[in-house]
Amino acid sequence: MTQTTSPRPSWSDAPHGWNWLAQDADGRWFWYAVEPQLGLAGGVWRSPRRAQQFAGQGDPNPLWYESCMQRPAEERADVSREQK
């Protein structure tokens, strides 16, 4: 069986200050303003509703629980410079 993967959203598309990205089991990607928590029961990452924003649709991901990532430090620095 071949596993298909879809590209993750680009950090250049992330809202300013939203420094987390994760994919749910169904393939949906979300930006997060705070670090999301693993929600094993539903195959989703959890955070307050106002702290998450849809980022794109990908292929279902059986390893979704390994997808959470923080914006790279150099990207966070670039965003900080743009806001000044």
Image (cartoon, rainbow, N blue to C red):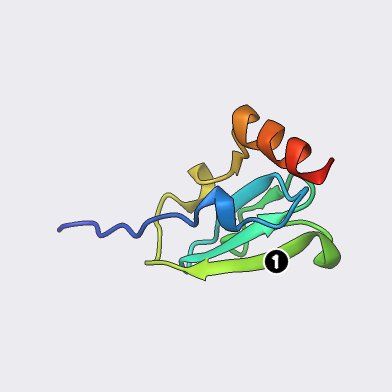
- Residue at (61% x, 65% y) in the render: 42
Q: Position of residue 60 (x, y in %)?
A: 40, 66
Residue ID for mark 1: 53
Residue 76 higher or lower than 19, as above or below = above
In the shown orientation, is residue 19 left or right of residue 26? right
- The one nearer the camera, 3 or 14, is 14
Q: Quadrant of residue 59?
A: bottom left
- Residue at (42% x, 67% y) in the render: 58
In the shown orientation, is residue 6 left or right of residue 39? left
- Residue at (61% x, 50% y) in the render: 21
- Residue at (56% x, 49% y) in the render: 11
Q: Secondary structure at mark 1?
A: strand
Number of residue marks: 1
Q: Quadrant of residue 70?
A: top right
Q: Quadrant of the C terminus?
A: top right
Q: Position of residue 8 (x, y in %)?
A: 45, 54
Q: Residue furthest top?
A: 73
Q: Quadrant of the N terminus?
A: bottom left
Q: Residues within 10 Å of mark 1 (few under 14, many from 20)?
A: some
Q: Quadrant of residue 79?
A: top right
- The one nearer the camera, 37 or 21, is 21
Q: Amino acid at mark 1?
A: Gln
